[in-house]
Structures are given as structure tokens and as C-alpha cells.
Image: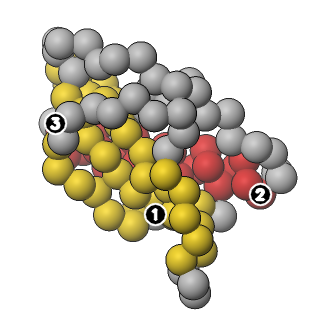
Amino acid sequence: MAVSATNTEPSRLVETPLRWDVPDKGIGYRCEIRIRQEADGFVSYVPSLKGVVSQGDDTQSAVKNITEALQGVISTYLNEGMEIPWEKPEAPKKDEVCFWIVVKGG
């Protein structure tokens, strides 16, 4: 489940999302997501973690759905004892809106 979501802010190219340990709350990850409008709704994805993609009827549902997808992927990697394969993202395209979200890990 998401810890919180933030409003839009300019994309920053970073090597990996920010990770921190919060006492009594576990590990958290601050990750960039990108959303673009398509003919039948909105597509959302995590540019630093290939394959994490979702969609929604509006931007709010696209953020909610990609947050849930990212939470599931991070939990799977951590539960399996695998390193999360973060990648340096490319610059966003003109038609993409960037958001930062925070998800709980593990």
C-alpha cells in the first residue's frame, strides 16, 4: 500500500529511487512515475523499473493503479531476496506528466 503521493514536479534523472528505513514502519522508496493520455485513458509507468506499467480512466486512477503495481513488484523482489533492478531513466517525453510517489517496501 502506498505511503503517500506527491504532486507533479520536474523529473530528475537519478540512478535509483530514494530508499530509507523508517523505524517501526519499514523500508520506503520514493519513485518517479510518468503518465500520458491515450485514446482510451491514461497509461502510467515507472521509468526506473522496466515492466512496471498500468493504466486508468483518469490520472487519479492511473496513479493509484501504478502505485499498487509498484508496491507488488517491490514486495516480490524483497520477499524473494532479490536486488531491485533499478535503471537510470531517460528524460520524459513532452506528452508525459511526472509524479513522485512513496511506496512501502517489504
80 shown above or below 15? below
Q: Amino acid at mark 2?
A: Asn
Estimate the x, y position of residue 99 in percent, counting from the top left.
Answer: 26, 41
Image quadrant for the C terminus?
Answer: bottom right
Q: Secondary structure at mark 2?
A: helix
Question: Does residue 31 appear left or right of residue 61 in this picture?
Answer: right
Q: Which mark is residue 79?
A: 2
> Upstream in the sequence, badge 1 or badge 2?
1
Q: Amino acid at mark 1?
A: Met
Bin the neighbour count of mark 2 within 10 Å (Cα to Cα): few under 14, some 14-19, many 20 and up.
few
Q: Which of pointers 3 and 2 indicates the residue nearer the eye?
A: 2
99 shown above or below 27? above
Asked where in the image residue 55 lies, by quadrant, the reply is top left
Q: CA distance from mark 3 to mark 1?
A: 20 Å
Q: Which mark is residue 58?
A: 3
40 shown above or below 9? above
Q: CA distance from mark 3 to mark 2?
A: 32 Å
Question: Does residue 7 appear left or right of residue 63 in this picture?
Answer: left
Along the line of sight, which residue is nearer the eye, 66 or 92?
Answer: 92
Q: Which mark is residue 1?
A: 1
Q: Which of pointers 3 and 1 indicates the residue nearer the eye?
A: 1
Q: Residue at x 17, y 42 (%)?
A: 8
Q: Residue at x 50, y 44 (%)?
A: 17
Badge count? 3
Res. 45 in view: no
Estimate the x, y position of residue 93 in percent, counting from the top left.
Answer: 25, 13
Q: Secondary structure at mark 3?
A: loop
Q: Amino acid at mark 3?
A: Asp
> Upstream in the sequence, badge 3 or badge 1?
1
Along the line of sight, which residue is nearer the eye, 95 or 57?
Answer: 95
Q: Secondary structure at mark 1?
A: loop
Residues tagged 3 and 1 counted as in contact (Cβ below 8 A): no
